[in-house]
Amino acid sequence: MTRTSEYTKLRIISLASKAKSINAIVHQLKEEDTKITRQTVAKVLKKYRGSETLADKTAPGRQPTLTREHMDFIDSKMEENDALTSIGIINSQATTQLHSYTANCSTAANSIYTV
């Protein structure tokens, strides 16, 4: 079972807008060397008439956990070092955070002793 191409879906809508029947659409598409069944044409038309779009519905399930910011961060790290792996990125990020934390702690400690 293959997916119906966007071109074929648009062609079905175009032919249906010319008041062609489902059987006439199937016949026309077969003449254009497009393999299609009557059921597929009916499903495309039903979906289009119901929502006025051919786009797929959003899939149910867990949403992606990576945000655009995450992807930008990964891209920037990969531009710096193309051979970097995900573990390498995690380690470099952890090292950066550790250095930042250590610097903040030493600054805090210095301010306590200078008071």
Image (cartoon, grey):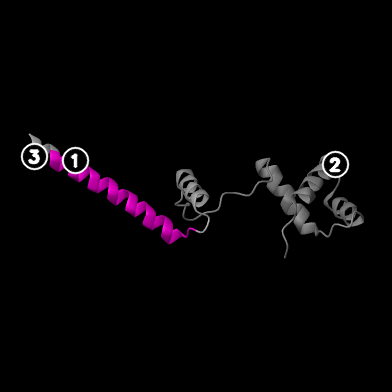
Q: Position of residue 61 (x, y in %)?
A: 49, 56
For marks 3 and 1, give the CA distance. 10 Å
User: 10 Å neighbourhood of mark 2: few (<14), some, or many (≥20)?
Assistant: few
Q: Is residue 41 magenta?
A: no
Residue lying furthest bottom: 1
Q: Secondary structure at mark 3?
A: helix
Q: Which residues are magenta?
A: 84-110
Which image quarter is the C terminus in? Answer: top left
User: 10 Å neighbourhood of mark 3: few (<14), some, or many (≥20)?
Assistant: few
Looking at the image, which is closer to me, 30 or 89?
A: 89
Looking at the image, which is closer to me, 9 or 112?
A: 112
Which secondary structure dominates the residues rendered in magenta?
Answer: helix
Quadrant housing residue 27: bottom right
Q: Which residue is mark 1?
A: 107
Q: Which residue is mark 3?
A: 113
Q: Position of residue 52 (x, y in %)?
A: 68, 40
Q: Can you tell which mark lies on residue 19?
A: 2
As shown in the figure, which amino acid type bears the numbered disc 2?
Ala
Q: Residue at x 92, y 55 (%)?
A: 31
Q: Residue at x 56, y 49 (%)?
A: 58
Q: Secondary structure at mark 2?
A: loop
Answer left or right for 65 relative to 107: right
As shown in the figure, which amino acid type bears the numbered disc 3?
Tyr
As shown in the figure, which amino acid type bears the numbered disc 1?
Thr
